[in-house]
Amino acid sequence: MTVRLRAHHLLCMLTYVGKGYSPAFIANYDRIAGRLAGGEDILLVTGPDDICAPILNDSDCHCFRESVTERDAKAIEAVSRLLARPLDPGSRINLDAGMLTTMRNAFAAGKTRQACRECEWFELCSSVADGGFAGAKIAIP
């Protein structure tokens, strides 16, 4: 199977520790983290993705806001630069241990965080990165 992710979730997944918008959101994200850790590939998509699914019917769902679309654009640019390959919706990524380490190192160093500046989770993600990603749910042996 394949995990469908919007671009800024390539950054969010690096620090996901089991916190989120609702119990349903967290349960869904936990399943997705397990799938990624199990070797499923990633398909980049435009707009809401597999992580967004539990909150799409919420009256205050932010998934369609312009600010989130801008976050996706900044993230795809930063990750493309980091991985030295063009990425766009439809691109597939096979996340392995080396790539996860590369992405986390760049995130911790601030090299890929342009998309994170206005995010409500910025401080939590900073704390996880500063702690060496301890407790992050996605781990690839």
Image: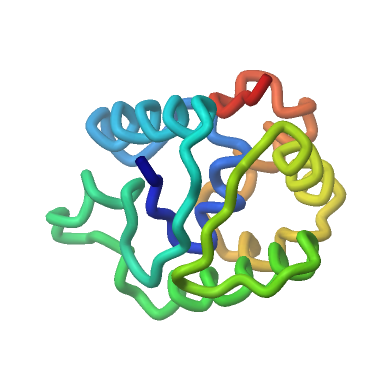
> What residue do we see at 61% from left, 71% from top?
87
The quadrant of the picture occupied by the N terminus is top left
Q: Is residue 82 above or below residue 12?
A: below
Q: Quadrant of residue 86?
A: bottom right
- Residue 28 pos. (x, y %): 30, 33
Up the image or down, 116 lies above or below 11; here it is below
For residue 86, side relative to residue 10 (left or right): right
- Compared across the picture, whether 36 is left or right of 60 comes to right
Of residues 90 and 23, the one drawn nearer to the viewer in this rendering: 90
Q: Quadrant of the C terminus?
A: top right
Towards the viewer: 116 or 84: 84
Q: Position of residue 126 (x, y in %)?
A: 70, 42
Q: Position of residue 56 (x, y in %)?
A: 20, 56
| Quadrant of residue 43 within the rendered picture | bottom left
Q: Is residue 6 left or right of residue 81?
A: left
Residue 57 image-quadrant placement: bottom left
Q: Residue at x 50, y 25 (%)?
A: 38
Q: Nearer the viewer, residue 48 or 98?
A: 98
Coloring scheme used: rainbow
Q: Position of residue 123 (x, y in %)?
A: 64, 44
